[in-house]
Image (cartoon, coloured by chain):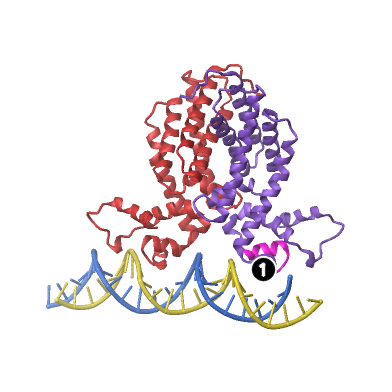
Chain colours: A purple, B red, C blue, D yellow
Amino acid sequence: MSNISSLKTEQGAKSRPSKGQTSRATILLTAAKLVTIKGLNGLSLRDLAAEVGISKSGLYAHFKDKEELELATIETAAVIFDNEVLQPAMQAHAGTERLKAVANSFFSHLERKVFPGGCFFAAVAAELDTRPGPAHDRVVEVLDKWLSLLKQCILDAQLHGEIDAKADVAQAVFEIEAMLLAANFLFVMRNDPIHLTQSRRGIDNVLARLAVSTAAKKR
Amino acid sequence: MSNISSLKTEQGAKSRPSKGQTSRATILLTAAKLVTIKGLNGLSLRDLAAEVGISKSGLYAHFKDKEELELATIETAAVIFDNEVLQPAMQAHAGTERLKAVANSFFSHLERKVFPGGCFFAAVAAELDTRPGPAHDRVVEVLDKWLSLLKQCILDAQLHGEIDAKADVAQAVFEIEAMLLAANFLFVMRNDPIHLTQSRRGIDNVLARLAVSTAAKKR
DNA sequence: ATTATCTATAGATCTATAGATAATGC
DNA sequence: ATTATCTATAGATCTATAGATAATGC
C-alpha cells in the first residue's frame, strides 16, 4: 500500500504535487505497479484511485473507460521497461556482452522492484494468454520485440565469432529466455536473489556450450 | 464454453448423470479448468455455475464460501497433475530417464490441454505470487514438491553415474525448471508445439553438459 | 477534478420444493 | 401405504462493489 504510493516521490520532495497536478503520468505509473500485484483484471478503479489519492471519477477525466486505461498502462510499462532494461543494455557492445548486459539490467530491475510483482510483461502475458483482445495483442508485440532483441544478440555474437556460426539460433533464444523467465518466476515467488545468480550462471552455461561445441547438430 | 462442459462426458454416455448427481467432483473439475483461463480471482460463481449447468446456490450446497471452493479446486488440480504427470513418470527408472519422463508427461499434458490454460500451478502461482493466504501457501507447497522431484532425479542420476557427481544440483534443477516453465509459457501463448521440442532439447543440452564437463566449477 | 448517482454483477443467505430414502403403521 | 426426514437444488433477495455518467466547482 503505502510503499507503492511512496514510489511517486521520485518526482522530488521539493514540489509536492498538488492534487490538481496528480497527473496522468502518476496514475499510469501507479497502475503499472499495481497491475503486477493484482493483475489487469484484479485492478479496480477504486483501488487505483485510492492508491493515487484521487476520486474514482478523477480517473475518468483521463481515460474513457477501463480498457483505455489498461492499454495506456501497458504503454507506460513498455516505456519503463525500455528505460530500465533495454536502453542501459544498448550501451554494451553487440553480441554476448550485450546479451549479458540485458540479463543484468533485467535482474537489476527485478531486485530494485521497479515493478513490485516482478516483470510486468511476464505477469500480464500469463494473465492474458488465453483472453483475446487488444491488450493481449499489444503484450505479445512487446514480448516479440524482446525475443527479437535476444535473437539479434545471438546473431551478432555469431558474426563476432563469440559463438558457433552453426548454432541453432532459435534454440539459443529459447534457452536464454527460459533462464530469464525462471529468474523472474522464482525470484518473485521466493524473494531470494540466489535465483538471479542461478539464472546468470545458466546463461553463461548456454553461451559456453555454444562457443565450443561445433558438434551440436540439429537432430 | 461448451467444449469445457463437454469434458465431463468422460463419465460415460451410458448413465446420463441426473441433476441430482451433478457432483462436487464435476464442479471441481470444471473449476480447475476454468481457473487456468480466468484465474482464481477472475472465476465468478455465476460463470462456474453456468458452465456446470447448475444454479449459483447449488454451489453453496457443496462449499461454504468461495475460499473453500478455491482450496478444493487447488486440491483437485493437484490430484489431476499427479495422475497425468507425476505418476506416469514414476514408471521410468530413477535418474535421467525419469527426469525425461517427467518432462515428456508434462509436455503431453500441455498438448492434450488437460488444463486449457496450460499448467495449473504455473498459472496460479503467477497470479498468487504477491497475494498472501492459504491458497498461496498450498500452491507453493505443490511447487516445492515438484522441485524436490526434479532434484531427486538429478541426485539419482549422479548415483547412477549418468551425470557428474560434482555437478551443482541446485543449479541443474534451476535450469531444468527453466526449460519446463518456458515450454509452458511459450506454448500457451503461441500454441505452437515447437516450444515443447525446444524445451526437450534444452533439457538434453543441460544433461549432456553435466555428463561430460567435470570442469564446471561453481563461480 | 469532486460529489452524487446509476446499473450490473459479485459473493452470500434465505425459503421453498423436488425427489429419494428411512421409519412406521396396518 | 404413510409419514417423516434427508439431500440437493432453484429462485428470490441482500449487501457490497464494479465500471460508468451527470451535474457541478474551481
Q: Nearer the viewer, residue B8 or A192?
A: B8
Q: Quadrant of the N terminus of chain A?
A: bottom right
Q: Nearer the viewer, residue D3 or A6?
A: A6
- Residue B20 sits in quarter: bottom left
- Residue A49 sits in quarter: bottom right
Tell me the chief SS of the magenta region. helix
- Residue in the image at 86% along x and 59% along y: A15
Residue A45 sits inside the magenta stretch: yes
Amino acid on which the number 1 mark rests in the picture: Tyr
Q: Give the percent coordinates (x, y) of residue B143.
A: 52, 41
Residue A96 sits inside the magenta stretch: no
- Residue in the image at 60% along x and 52% along y: B131
Q: Is residue B185 above or below residue A23?
A: above
The span picked out in magenta is: A44-60
Q: Nearer the viewer, residue B28 or A84?
A: A84
Q: Secondary structure at mark 1?
A: helix
Q: Is residue B66 left or right of residue A55?
A: left
Residue B95 makes an appearance in the image: no
Q: Give the percent coordinates (x, y) of residue B201.
A: 49, 29
Q: Give the percent coordinates (x, y) of residue B212.
A: 54, 17
Q: Chain of mark 1?
A: A
Q: Which residue is mark 1?
A: A60
